[in-house]
Each structure stands twice: as C-alpha cells, then as structure tokens.
Image (cartoon, helix red, strand yellow):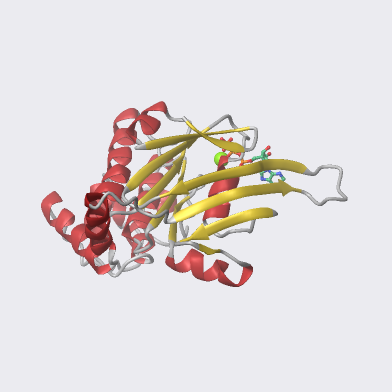
Amino acid sequence: MSNARSEAPIASGGASLSDEAAARILRAEAARAGTAEAVVAAAARTAEGLEEPPLIEVDDVRYSYGSKESRTKRSVLKGATAAFRRGTMYAVVGASGCGKSTLLSLLGGLDLPKQGEVRFAGEPLDAAGLAEHRRRNVSFVFQGYNLIDYLTAAENVSLATKLPPLPLLEKVGIGPDEARRNVLALSGGQQQRVAVARALASEAPVVLADEPTGNLDEVAAEGVADILRDTAHRMGKCVICVTHSPMLARKADRVFRLAKGRLIKA
Ligand SMILES: Nc1ncnc2c1ncn2[C@@H]1O[C@H](COP(=O)(O)OP(=O)(O)OP(=O)(O)O)[C@@H](O)[C@H]1O
Ligand SMILES: [Mg+2]
C-alpha cells in the first residue's frame, strides 16, 4: 500500500477534535435527524407500557436466485419474519451461504422479495419506493466496504453528511493522516472503519451492516461493535448487523438465527 496523500481537499479544514467534541457533534446530528425526538417519544411510550412499533420488518419473505425456468433456481429465504425497532442493536447469525446478505439487501431496498413484504414504518416497500427508501431510510456498511475508490477517507464520509468528517473518523480510530489518504491506500481494516463512519454519519434511521467487524483485530472489532451499539442506544437508530462474530452477537440486544430460510429468535 502506498503512503501517498491525495491532493484533493477535504471538507473539514483538518484540525482534529476531542472525543467530547465529537460526541457533541454526533448528538447534534441525532437531533437534526429527528432521532432524539424519536428516543424521547419511545421512552414516553415505554413509560405508558406501550410497545414501540417496528421501524422496519420482514413479513413471510421469500427470495430465490435464478429464474423459474432455470435449473439453477435456489430458494434462499423461505418465509422469513421479524420486526426491528429503533434504539436497538440486532445481530443476525447463521452459516455461510444461509442468506444473511440477501436479507440485508431486501431490508435495504436493493431488491424486492419474490413473495411476502418488507415494510418501513408500516408501509410496504414497492418498486416505486425503493430508490427513496435507499436514499432516506437506510445506510449500509457492506461486506465489500462500497467506498468510492478515487476519494479520500474524509471525502467518502462527507458524501453522507455536512458535518466535518475528521471527528467522525477519529471515533472509529482513523487519524487525520489516514483521513486525507485515498481509501485504496488504507488497509482492509481501516477501509472497514471508514465505511462504518460513513454509515454513522448518515441521517438514515436504519443502519444495515454486513460483517462490520470482519476485517478487524480483536480490539478494533470491539471498538466498532461498541460504536454500533451506542448508535442504537444514544442516537435511537435501528442497527442490524449480520455477522459470524460471537463478540458482536454478544453486544447485540437481540439475536436472530437464520436457518433453513427462516429467522428464529436466538
Ligand atoms: N447473485 C446471486 N446469484 C445466485 N446465487 C446467489 C447470488 N447471491 C447469492 N447467491 C447464493 O445465495 C445464497 C445466500 O447468499 P448470501 O450472500 O445471502 O449468504 P450469506 O449468509 O450472506 O453468506 P456469508 O456468511 O458467506 O456472507 C448462497 O448460496 C449464495 O451462493
Ligand atoms: Mg454475506
């Protein structure tokens, strides 16, 4: 990996802030996104003994790859049902190839189920609404990072927020030097953390994370898991992680196992 710095300017002006300042900015961001009000509303509902309605849910969702005519048709989801709420971190676990990434792509509006429904705030996602759902409601941390490879780390984060990117990157352990580097000049684990910072910077109330700690050492993995948990608990977001990591699953408030195409509470 080269250490060459990108010539492209970054949005923040460069000075790094303390953790406290970064936390203040995150809180302001939460308030701007309306999530703070949602947390207060959720607390009021809990006090009244009413359960928070699901923010996003899958209802008897079926999905297969390949066409009916093709011999290679493969059913992956066979009636998956689950509800996901704000202020909660979820882990979805299951064997490799069981359909975890497929489930995330349906929650994220990248495709529609063949049968059943995905609903956001009680409304079914339909073909017309998918682009809007992807733009407003969800942010992704993909298994393959999905960073823009000709931009710096800071510029990638700036795509998701008007806030200065350096404090957000610092929260996931990316210093100002790495923040100004083209993302291809970062290690796999550093790129993973940039992807996490970008998802957290977004105003979207749902964070969908595919193996967010997959390329990290134990310490960094735990740090990212704690940040995701804080994002759920302090910013009131609905964080859904698919993972093979027992550590990440332990940090989650609720765990689902995906097996034989269905979701089971673990
Ligand atoms: N585009 C595709 N075309 C055909 N089959 C696919 C496609 N994408 C995934 N599959 C198959 O669907 C099944 C579910 O894949 P998926 O990526 O959802 O699994 P996963 O649970 O995320 O696995 P992993 O833990 O290894 O990431 C696998 O058998 C996979 O080979
Ligand atoms: Mg996967």
- Residue 58 in view here: yes
Image side of residue 1 versus residue 218, left or right: right
Query: From what the image shows, is residue 3 above or below residue 257?
Result: below
Q: Residue at x 36, y 36 (%)?
A: 252
Observer-nearest residue: 114 or 227? 114
Image coords of residue 199 (percent x, y): 38, 55
Residue drawn at x 75%, y 41% is 74
Q: Nearer the viewer, residue 246 or 11?
A: 246
Q: Position of residue 93 (x, y in %)?
A: 50, 33
179 over 29 or under it: above or below:
above
How many marks the image carries: the answer is 0
What is the quadrant of residue 71 in the picture?
Answer: top right
Q: Considering the image in quadrants, where does the N terminus appear?
A: top left
Whether residue 182 can be seen here: no
Please indicate whether residue 10 sits to the left or right of residue 62 in the image.
left
Rendering coords of residue 241 (x, y %): 44, 42
Q: Residue at x 35, y 67 (%)?
A: 8
Decide which of 232, 248 is in the foreground and name it: 232
| Residue pictured at 83% horizontal, 50% vertical | 68
Query: Whereabouts is ligand 2, in terms of quadrant?
Result: top right
The spot of residue 62 in percent (x, y) is 67, 47
Q: Viewed as shown, does residue 62 lie left or right of 247?
A: right
